Image (spheres, rainbow, N blue to C red):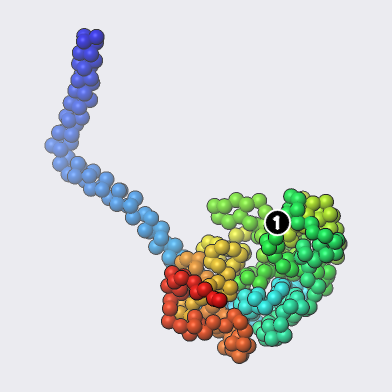
Amino acid sequence: MRHARAKEKGTRRTIFMVSFVPTLIVVIFLISWRPLLLPYFFRYAKWVITEVINDKQRVLENELQFALKEWRLYELESRFGQEWCKENVRQRSDVTWLTQVVNDEFVVPTLVLGHSIRTFSCQKNMIAFIAESVSLGARKSLQSVGWETRLVEEMDCDWLDSKLGGDRNRGFFGRPRGYRIRGTHTRFHALNYTQFSKILYVDADYMLMSNIDELFDIPNDFAAATCSRPGVLDPCFNAGLLVFRPDTTDYYGIMKLWFETTKKDTCPNDQVLLWHYYAADGNWRALPYTYNIRRIVFRPMKSFHFACCRPPKPWSARCRPSRKEAGDFKGPILAVDDMVFIFWKNFYNILKKYGLEDWWRSTKFFRPEQEFGVVPYADCWKQEPRVTS
């Protein structure tokens, strides 16, 4: 055993000497032959390491340049976009924008949506389906920014339950009570508006950041933005942005599928229903991310959808920036919370441009302590929420 260990130790020493001695000789040779080579090598190695460390910062700086360029484009389109439309685009009567408003709470984002359409789009037909619960003052405010308000029958799963009798909130598509969103299926009425060749439907919590009129010209009968976003795969589409060709055949087909599915299982929401009618058979076109950005900052940003989670829906969130803080926001958009400042900056401008200040102050949504206060928006979220009795 001792003899084996001694032999192994001697072998290791031999290997070390065989590898170390030639290396030492090479180094000595290089130093004597090219004395600047070794220092250069170490400086170069140090430079490579520094570049690797600084690469992330350069990427951030490059993203900042993209953000600044995009913000300049946003400001240019905001200011001069309509002049370009008058000189280059023909007004069309066969296309329209469409949204739906189920109560006064969604009037605020619908005003911002309408203002963004008026700012960026060259096509001015704007229809808003409204429910009976929308107040007269809210309707007038919507009309002031260009919405043609149309009172239609409000449709959702509760509506269908009343038609069929009983509560069908069980089964595969079942959702807990309180989960259902009011008026979601009301948009199906638009399939009967065959006087239009294309309808571009957007949820009330959608906001244009650029002209997207090219969507009116897509040849497909139905198109939507995917639920996926960069880095996140989600095999469905988001019904907050739909482009479709109205057809009464599709209306009756969707209504039939809705009734039959509800009878067999439970009431599917509008997005699930549209998915099974169009996308399950491949009868749709997936739109790029840029048309329905939500939850993240992604470029190019042609629109933003306050769909969920972060940022919270600005009009119903606990905190909002003051009029001064929102007005002072000069871009660029670097974080998703910056969209809140853009939203309120647009809304405060709407109050002045369309003379809606008196209406706004008469609503329960007006918060003078925040709108005219001095507490920064970021600090507001750090404060404990007030408990109202």
261 horizontally vs 71: left or right? right
Residue 181 location, quadrant = bottom right
Inspect this view and state whether residue 80 appears: no
- Give the image location of residue 305, x and y in percent: 60, 67
Is residue 162 positioned above or below 50 on the image?
A: below
Which quadrant holds residue 201? bottom right
The structure residue drawn at horizontal position 62% and vertical position 52%, both measured from the top left corner, is 234
**What is the count of numbered marks?**
1
Q: Position of residue 276 (x, y in %)?
A: 76, 53
Which residue position holds label 1?
Answer: 175
* Secondary structure category for the residue under label 1: loop
Name the spot of residue 43 as percent of width and height, x first: 23, 48
Quadrant of the snapshot with the N terminus: top left
Q: Residue 146 versus residue 23: which sits nearer the camera?
A: 146
Q: Residues within 10 Å of mark 1 (few under 14, many from 20)?
A: some
The amino acid at mark 1 is Arg
Tell me what residue is drawn at x 61 percent, y 82 percent: 364
